Image (tube, helix red, strand yellow):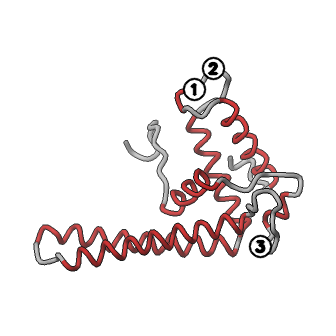
Amino acid sequence: PLAGSNSSLLLLTEIETMILTSACYHGMPTWSEKWLDLLSPGHKSRCRGMTWTTFGRRLEKLGTSAVEKARRELKQKEASRDRKNEEDQFLCSEHTLFRASQALQQAKDYTQEPENLAKKTVMMLAKLLKKIGFISNDLRSDYGIGYKVLKWYSNQITSWAKALHIVDSV
């Protein structure tokens, strides 16, 4: 299906995939009335130790791992480059390394700009929630995480969107 069609696909960039991976694995900063503290690079959160800078550092680790993996794969392809049909795979590995390097640089930039990281994350997760569809007690049980979790997560995203003044973008 093409982007922009009525498809249920959500096309993600490398950095968006890393953000989603990190949010699913580690969680994200929990919104509170003191949300501005969570944007401050020097602030240490008492609740789970999660700030947007911490989230950014986790993205950097994911990006570093992705670059290292792409480099290993590229070296393996270089070693077996003798065969003609391996040329396409080699070029694909080069492109993977390039994309991983770009995502790592974006992660580093986001770590330095926690508010931009927060905005990017909230907008992307809001888009994902919108793709999931309306949350009600009897709908969306097929996702297996339950109504209460989805509702709490939706409230978190809405609170962050309002605090970051991106509610119109969501």
Question: 10 Å neighbourhood of mark 2: few (<14), some, or many (≥20)?
Answer: few
Extreme residue in the left direction: 83
| Residue at screen point 56% across, 54% down | 20
| Residue at screen point 78% across, 65% down | 39
**Which kind of residue does numbered mark 2 sit on?**
Asp
* Tag shown at residue 41: 3
Q: CA distance from mark 3 to mark 1?
A: 38 Å
| Residue at screen point 49% across, 59% down | 13
Find out whether the residues at labels 2 and 1 contact each other: C-beta distance under 8 Å.
Answer: yes
Q: According to the image, label 1 marks what residue?
A: 141
In primary-sequence order, the first of circles 3 and 1 is 3
Q: Quadrant of the N terminus?
A: top left
Q: Tell me where residue 60 appears, x and y as whole percent.
A: 57, 71
**Which kind of residue does numbered mark 1 sit on?**
Ser
Q: Is 20 left or right of 79, judged from the image as shown?
A: right
Please tell me whether mark 2 sits on a helix, a strand or a loop: loop
**Which kind of residue does numbered mark 3 sit on?**
Pro
Extreme residue in the top direction: 138
Q: CA distance from mark 2 to mark 3?
A: 41 Å
Q: Is 85 left or right of 116, judged from the image as shown?
A: left
Q: CA distance from mark 2 to mark 1?
A: 7 Å
Q: Nearer the viewer, residue 133 or 57?
A: 57
Find out whether the residues at labels 2 and 3 contact each other: C-beta distance under 8 Å.
Answer: no
Please tell me whether mark 3 sits on a helix, a strand or a loop: loop
* Tag shown at residue 138: 2
| Residue at screen point 79% across, 47% down | 159
Question: 10 Å neighbourhood of mark 1: few (<14), some, or many (≥20)?
Answer: few
- Quarter-wise, where is residue 79 in the image? bottom left
Question: 10 Å neighbourhood of mark 3: few (<14), some, or many (≥20)?
Answer: some
In primary-sequence order, the first of circles 2 and 3 is 3
